[in-house]
Amino acid sequence: QLQLVESGGGLVQPGGSLRISCAASGFPLDNFAIAWFRQAPGKEREGVSCIGGPRTMANLLNSVEGRFTISRDNAKNTVYLQMNSLKSEDTGIYYCAVSPRPRAWCSAGATDYAYWGQGTQVTVSS
């Protein structure tokens, strides 16, 4: 059974940076699609960034283009999201999600992912 644990969230000032992590146990992630989603209070969960099974990477939100970078360390079975130039609207709970089968392409749809972590809170505020 795959388990995902996010970490690295916290409080950061606008313009600051933060790197959050998603550590997996249970089976290797290197051939699966992994995405970061976020959910702000009162809003729906939205896809932020994804790294696909065929080793494609994509930001799923125009608003994070040029600021967020997703990466994968297969040796550590961990996926990261480096977030720079953070804005107040980036505040939310960030979740990592994994596709149900290997070699899946990136998708912004939450229903395309079978495994979810518990989330880590990111708050951007002065």
Image: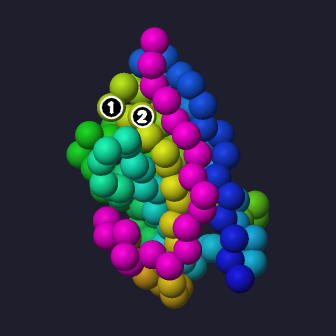
Q: Position of residue 106 (x, y in %)?
A: 37, 70
Please state if 12 lies on the left or on the right of 38 as rendered: right
Q: Residue at x 69, y 71 (%)?
A: 3
Between 67 and 100, the one nearer to me in the picture: 100
- Residue 2 located within the stretch drawn in magenta: no
Q: Residue furthest bottom?
A: 101
For the residues labelled 2 and 1, say whether their Cβ atoms are less than 8 Å apart: yes
Residue 110 found in image quarter: bottom left
Q: Label 2's element? A: loop
Amino acid residing under circle 1 = Glu
* Residue 124 can be seen in this image: yes
Q: Residue at x 36, y 25 (%)?
A: 88
Q: Say which residue label 1 marks.
A: 89
Label 2 to label 1, Cα distance in Å?
Answer: 5 Å
Q: Report crowding for label 2: few under 14, some 14 to 19, many 20 or more residues within 10 A (C-alpha).
A: many
Q: Quadrant where the N terminus lies?
A: bottom right
Instruction: Specify the label residue 43 is tagged with.
Output: none
Q: Residue at x 45, y 19 (%)?
A: 125
Please state if 49 lies on the left or on the right of 6 as rendered: left
Amino acid residing under circle 2 = Thr
Q: How many marks?
A: 2
The magenta region covers 107-126
Q: Position of residue 117 (x, y in %)?
A: 60, 62
In the image, is residue 7 above or below residue 2?
above
Q: Residue furthest top?
A: 126
Q: Position of residue 21 (x, y in %)?
A: 63, 49
Q: Residue at x 35, y 56 (%)?
A: 45
Q: Residue furthest front?
A: 42
Q: Residue furthest left?
A: 62
Q: Label 1's element? A: helix
Instruction: Specify the label residue 91 is tagged with.
Output: 2
- Residue 114 located within the stretch drawn in magenta: yes
